[in-house]
Amino acid sequence: MFEPPTVEDEVVLVGRSNVGKTTLMREIVGKKYDVGSRPGVTLEPNRYEWNAEGFAVTDLPGFGFMSGVDEERREDIKDGIVGYLEDNADSILVAVHVIDASAFIEIADRWESRGEVPHDIDLHGFLVDIDVPVVVSANKTDKVDDRDATLDGIAERLGYPPPWKQWDDAIAPTCAKRGSTDALFGAIRTHLSSQGRDDLLKFFS
Ligand SMILES: Nc1nc2c(ncn2[C@@H]2O[C@H](COP(=O)(O)OP(=O)(O)OP(=O)(O)O)[C@@H](O)[C@H]2O)c(=O)[nH]1
């Protein structure tokens, strides 16, 4: 359903709708490369490619509830995302799983109390299963009161025993709106280096 990049390797941003993926994308590529804004719900991948480095950053559409998008289309998008990740797992250097840190625990617990697996927990397990290095961007930290307790709660629900700080290659608090991405970029750099791609560190400096 979604076209892969024309270059060999990529970093993907994936997560529920409205968590801040596009804002983060702009933090990665926008300032340096003058990318314009793209308001509204993202229904197709939003991608930037650099041929010299053979590298792309792909902002995948959001899944879950989207205002103005019907149920059938939402299911198609979710299937498209899962298929894309599965088909391209070998070329995905890092998947950034973006969540809304201010809403994650409440939503996850509500779904679990109904006996359902929350979308985010499902997605995270899937990324781990297909062997893609994953970093959780726990975004919107500006809306969180007790940061450490919230991040511990998120870590625990995603299968990382607290304290969250011991998982700094896997869990990175961000506030994309204010350009606060140091922890995330550090974690991405670690994963790129461990795959011998120091040539790409400049995109996350
Ligand atoms: N408070 C706060 N708001 C943020 C932050 N990052 C993004 N937002 C806001 O969250 C809303 C959604 O941001 P987007 O970047 O469009 O989210 P998205 O995940 O790409 O959304 P979809 O296109 O639906 O998948 C916008 O109003 C952003 O300004 C953040 O760190 N803090």
Image (spheres, rainbow, N blue to C red):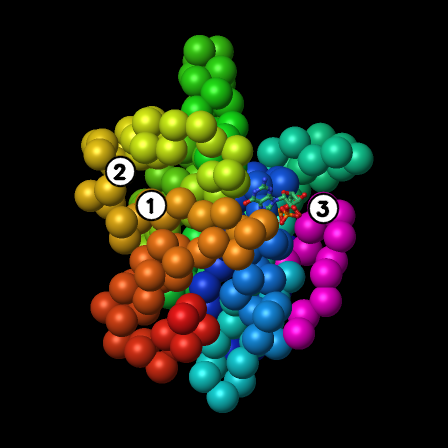
Residue 33: % across, % down: 61, 76
Of mark 1 and mark 2, the one earlier in the sequence is 2
User: What is the spatial separation of the Cα atoms under label 3 and label 1, in whole angstroms?
Assistant: 25 Å
User: What is the spatial separation of the Cα atoms under label 3 and label 2, in whole angstroms?
Assistant: 31 Å
Amino acid type, callout 2: Trp
Tell me if 66 is positioned left or right of 81 in this view: right
Of mark 3 and mark 1, the one earlier in the sequence is 3
Q: Which mark is residue 164?
A: 2
| Kind of element beneath mark 3 | loop
Please name the predominant secondary structure of the magenta segment in the image.
loop
Quadrant showing the C terminus: bottom left
Residue behind mark 3 = 41
| Image height of 55 relative to 77, above or below | below
Q: Which mark is residue 171?
A: 1
| Label 3 neighbour load within 10 Å: few <14, some 14-19, many 20+ | some
| Kind of element beneath mark 2 | helix
Q: Residue furthest bottom?
A: 52
The residue that appears at 57% across and 75% down in the rendered structure is: 32
| Image height of 33 relative to 92, above or below | below
- Magenta-drawn stretch contains 42: yes
For label 3, being within 8 Å of ligand 1 is answered: yes
Amino acid type, callout 3: Val
Q: Nearer the viewer, residue 164 or 75?
A: 164
| Label 1 neighbour load within 10 Å: few <14, some 14-19, many 20+ | many
| Label 2 neighbour load within 10 Å: few <14, some 14-19, many 20+ | many
Circles 3 and 1, Cβ within 8 Å, touching? The answer is no
Q: Quadrant of ligand 1?
A: top right
For label 2, being within 8 Å of ligand 1 is answered: no
| Kind of element beneath mark 1 | strand
Circles 1 and 2, Cβ within 8 Å, touching? The answer is yes
The residue that appears at 79% across and 35% down in the rendered structure is: 68
